[in-house]
Amino acid sequence: MNPADLVGLGCGLLAALFIASGIPKIRRPFDLALALVRFGVAGRVRPGLGRLLGAVEVAVGVAVAVSPMLLPAAVAALLLLVAFTAVVLRSLAAGRSVECACFGIGERTSPATVVRNLVLMGVASYVAFAPGLPTLDQRISGILAGTLLTCGYLLISAMAVVKPFSARLDGRG
C-alpha cells in the first residue's frame, strides 16, 4: 500500500466517522445538548447547539471525503478531535463517565473513548501532512473501506451498550 492509498483510507475513515457521528446529533440534538451540560461545557440545555455541532461534524466529514485541498479539511477534523478529547479527559479526570452522545447510541465516556480519539487524531494528522494526494479511485476505495470499518465499530459499540447476548440469572429479563 503506497502513501496515497493510506491517505485515501484515512479520508474515508474520517469522513464516515464524522458523518455517522454528526447525523444523530442533527436528528436528535437534545441528546448532545444534554451531554454538553453534563460535560460542563454549557450551562443549560441548548438543542440548537447540538444541531449546530452535528452539522459541523457532517460538513467536516464531507470536506475530508471530497475536498481537493486536504490540509484544511483534515486540520478541521483534527481540531474537533482535540476539543472532544480535551472535554472527555477533563470529565474522566473529575471521576465522571458521561453519556457522550458521540454516535447517538448511549455510549459512556471511558479511557477507550480517549484511545479511539487519539487514534483518529493520528489518522487526521497523517491525512493532513502526508505527501501526495489520493486519486479519485483511491478516495472512493478509502470511503468504502472507511464506511465498512465505521459500520463495524458502530455495531460493536451498539452491542456493548445494548448487550443483546447478556443473560440475567435473577429471572428478570
Image: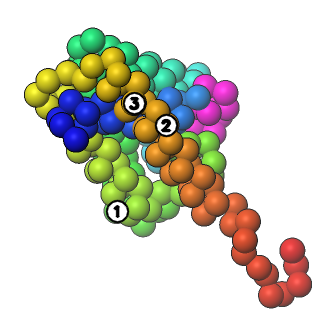
> Mark 3 or 2, which is nearer the eye?
3
Of marks 2 and 1, which one's residue comes earlier in the chain? 1
The residue to which callout 3 is attached is 141
Whether residue 109 is visible: yes
Of marks 3 and 2, which one's residue comes earlier in the chain? 3
Label 2 crowd bin: few (<14), some (14–19), many (20+), radius 10 Å: many
Query: Between residues 21 and 2, which one lies in front from this camera angle?
Result: 2
Q: Quadrant of the N terminus?
A: top left
Q: Main secondary structure of the magenta part?
A: helix
Whether residue 124 is visible: no
SS under mark 3 = helix
Tag 2: residue type? Answer: Thr
Residue at 21% from the left image edge and 30% from the top image edge: 4
Query: Between residues 16 and 96, which one lies in front from this camera angle?
Result: 16
The residue to which callout 2 is attached is 147
Q: Position of residue 55 (x, y in %)?
A: 51, 21
Of marks 1 and 3, which one's residue comes earlier in the chain? 1
130 inside magenta stretch: no
Q: Position of residue 13 (x, y in %)?
A: 39, 37
The residue to which callout 1 is attached is 93
Residue at 27% from the left image edge and 27% from the top image edge: 74
Label 3 crowd bin: few (<14), some (14–19), many (20+), radius 10 Å: some
SS under mark 1 = helix
25 inside magenta stretch: yes
> What separation in Å lies between label 3 and label 2 (alpha carbons)?
10 Å
72 left or right of 48?
A: left
Residue 11 vertical position relative to residue 119 in the rendered view, above or below = above
- The magenta segment is 24-34
Q: Are marks 1 and 3 in contact (CB under 8 Å)?
A: no
> What separation in Å lies between label 1 and label 3 (alpha carbons)?
39 Å
Q: Position of residue 118 (x, y in %)?
A: 28, 50
